[in-house]
Image (cartoon, rainbow, N blue to C red):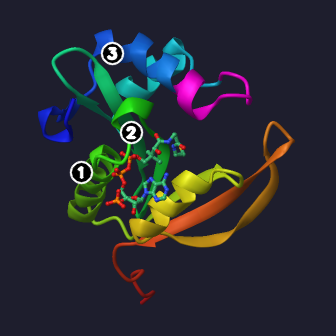
Amino acid sequence: MVAHAVTLRLARADDVQALAAMSRDLIEAGLGWRYSPQRMHRLMADRDTVVLVACDTAAVQGFAVMQFGDQRAHLVLLCVQPGLRRAGVGRRLLHWLLQSADVAGIESVHLELRADNDAALAFYRRMAFTETGQVPGYYGGQIAARRMVRRLRQAASSP
Ligand SMILES: CC(C)(COP(=O)(O)OP(=O)(O)OC[C@H]1O[C@@H](n2cnc3c(N)ncnc32)[C@H](O)[C@@H]1OP(=O)(O)O)[C@@H](O)C(=O)NCCC(=O)NCCS
């Protein structure tokens, strides 16, 4: 499968099981399962949350979840199936969301990732995110998180 055969679309109700399973197996491995099908359903129903999927004719190959506030957005989840990594799918998912955030007037996009996730760290650095610090025990009281941010525009100055 080549990346150009993958298209992006908003998630549908019948994607829920696949997205929850990908989160459990590809993102939350070793952390316990927080993004259950029920929680995925709630995210998809939330008007301030975008759930974007990358799929080919056979299956969902990747997805991303971003929550939009007034000035900040939070990238909650992002993953690509192992067989399709380093083919630009993660970049396409994130670009779509960053462009949406930009159009929405968002000032900055924030995320956390496991401090031991070197691949994701390299990816986010490549996507112009910068580290803002670490949070010990962020995941289950055991694994530290790195916090990262990508600024889209200057914060509005107070009057
Ligand atoms: C992080 C992740 C989403 C990246 O998705 P991807 O589709 O493989 O990334 P892309 O192909 O779009 O990579 C874009 C650029 O990021 C960098 N990059 C991506 N993966 C990398 C890796 N493993 N090592 C070093 N650099 C990497 C590269 O510069 C790459 O460009 P290049 O391939 O032309 O060199 C994917 O590795 C993944 O799903 N990981 C498991 C889940 C996860 O950790 N999610 C993030 C935390 S929630």
- Specify which label sits upstream in the sequence, 3 or 2: 3
Secondary structure state at the residue bearing disc 2: strand
Q: Count the marks: how many?
A: 3
Q: Position of residue 106 (x, y in %)?
A: 34, 64
- Disc sitting over residue 133 in the figure: none
Find disc 3 in the rendering and name its residue.
Answer: 15
Residue type pointed to by label 3: Asp
| Dot 1 crowding, Cα within 10 Å, few <14, some 14–19, many 20+ | some
The residue located at (38%, 31%) in the rendering is 83
Q: Which stretch appears magenta? A: 23-33
Q: Is residue 30 or residue 83 the one in the foreground?
A: 83
CA–CA distance in space, label 3 to label 2: 12 Å
First in sequence: mark 2 vs mark 1? 2
- Kind of element beneath mark 1: helix
Where's residue 141, x and y in %? Answer: 86, 41
- Residue closer to the observer: 97 or 44: 97
Which residue is tagged 2? Answer: 64
> Helix, strand or loop at disc 3?
helix
Label 3 crowding class (10 Å Cα cut-off): few <14, some 14-19, many 20+? some
Q: Which residue is mark 1?
A: 96
Q: Quadrant of residue 147?
A: bottom right
Identified at 25% across, 50% down, the residue is 92
Q: Earlier in the sequence, mark 3 or mark 1?
A: 3
Asked whether residue 81 is in view, the answer is no
Q: Where residue 34 sits in the image (x, y, percent)?
A: 64, 24
Residue 82's image quarter? top left
Mark 2: C-beta under 8 Å from nearest atom of ligand 1: no
